[in-house]
Image (cartoon, rainbow, N blue to C red):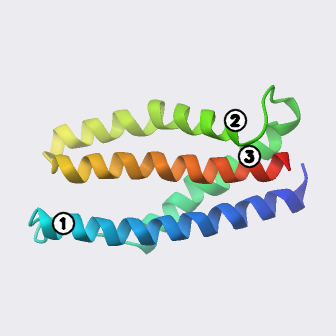
Amino acid sequence: MNAQKLILAVAVAGIALLILEYLRRIISGILIRRFELGETVEIQFLSSFLVNFVLCVMLPAVVYAALYPILPFTSFRSGFFIALFVFGVGQLPLTIRTYNQFRLSSALTAFELFWNLLTLLVTLGAITYLYHY
């Protein structure tokens, strides 16, 4: 396992995640004001960033670093494939269940789904791109 590549990949993906989380907070605030959900929805930045940093950056980077020598595909395309797989198997069913269980706003749920997919694509794409080059 190449520690220098791992640290670089975590740092670059973490910076990309920080920018994405900041933009998510701004756009979510606009959606909440537009649909008048201010009393029922609260947007958190730090806790969301930390959870995503661990689950979308650090864990995939360490797993990818360990499996990199034996993977049959490389480059950012492998990151996109892994991101789509994780999204389809992990995040999509949970979000749909939560939407139905708690009767959340459709617009806010659709935005969160889109943003989760974008976050996975950017972070895993950055990690796999940096490992390939």
For marks 2 and 3, the one nearer the N-term is 2
Q: Residues within 10 Å of mark 1 (few under 14, many from 20)?
A: some
Position of residue 120 relative to residue 78, above or below, is: below
Q: Do labels 1 and 3 touch, CB within 8 Å?
A: no
Q: Element at badge 1?
A: helix
The residue labelled by disc 1 is: 32
Q: Secondary structure at mark 3?
A: helix
Amino acid bearing label 3 = Thr
Whichever of callouts 1 and 3 sits on the residue coming sooner in the sequence is 1
Q: Quadrant of residue 46?
A: bottom left
Type of amino acid at the residue the image marks with label 1:
Ile
What is the CA distance from the residue labelled 2 to the residue labelled 1? Answer: 35 Å
- Return the x and y of residue 116 as percentages of the image width and height: 43, 49
Mark 2 touching mark 3, by CB under 8 A? yes
**Residue furthest top as drawn:** 72
Badge 3 density bin: few <14, some 14–19, many ≥20, Cα 10 Å: many
x and y percentages locating residue 91 in the rendered image = 42, 40
Considering depth in this image, is 78 or 92 the residue closer to the camera? 78
Q: Is residue 42 visible to the viewer in this orientation of the structure? A: no
Q: Is residue 43 left or right of residue 92?
A: left
Residue drawn at (71%, 67%) of the image: 11
Left or right, 6 with respect to 117, comes to right
Q: Is residue 1 found left or right of 25 in the rendered image? A: right
Q: Which numbered tag is attached to residue 78?
A: 2
Task: Please tell me which residue is depicted at 91% across the width and 53% down the height of the picture.
Answer: 2
> From mark 1 to mark 3, how far is it between C-alphas?
34 Å
Instruction: Measure the alpha-carbon separation of dots 2 and 3.
Output: 7 Å
| Kind of residue indicated by mark 2 | Ser
